[in-house]
Amino acid sequence: MVWTGDRRTRPRNGARRLPEKQRQRILKRYPTCMLAVPGRCTVTSTEVHHVVDAADGGSDNDFNDDGTPQLVGVCHECHKHVSAKTSAARRGGGTRVMREKERHPGVLP
Ligand SMILES: [Zn+2]
């Protein structure tokens, strides 16, 4: 998290606020981290992750129209990791993506 362009002018993945009730519902539905990044995951879901990033048209609905999850519970460490990767990719092809080889179990496109 070193980039300095964080002016919060527009909502971004991880920066959006979900209603507390919805957040609790998601965390209850996914009590364990859905990202499960090897070597990082702390297993217990504490945050809600937008599977489709807001910048890519992701909604704040629990599920997408096709029935795939849009909001899933993740742990802080994985969330941080994935958000960093997403912003890196968005910034220009992901020249310095950390640990490219990891795959996420069906939660990222
Ligand atoms: Zn995790």
Image: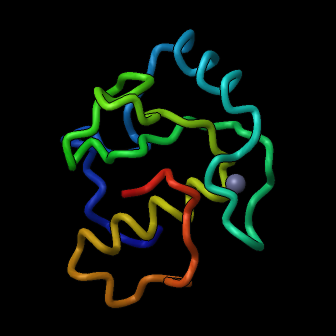
Q: Quadrant of the C terminus?
A: bottom left
- In the image, 24 versus 30, the foreground residue is 30
Residue drawn at point x = 45 percent, y = 66 percent: 84
Q: Quadrant of residue 36?
A: bottom right
Looking at the picture, how far across and down is residue 3, in whole percent? 35, 70
Q: Residue at x 66, y 50 (%)?
A: 76
Q: Nearer the viewer, residue 32 or 55?
A: 32
- The image shows a total of numbered marks equal to 0
Give the colour scheme of this rendering: rainbow
What residue sits 68% from the left and 32% below the top? 30
Q: Residue at x 49, y 83 (%)?
A: 100
Residue 1, percent from left and from top: 47, 67
Q: Is residue 95 above or below residue 60?
A: below
In this view, 84 is above or below 70: below
Instruction: Indicate the position of residue 41 as horizontal and vertical percent values.
Output: 75, 60
Q: Quadrant of ligand 1?
A: bottom right
Compared across the picture, whether 37 is left or right of 55 comes to right
Residue farthest along the top direction in this orientation: 21
Q: Which residue lies most toward the front here?
A: 66
- Nearer to me, 95 or 31: 31
Which residue sits furthest bottom? 95
Query: Percent position (x, y) of residue 48?
Result: 55, 35
The one nearer the camera, 94 or 103, is: 103
Residue 101: quarter of image: bottom right
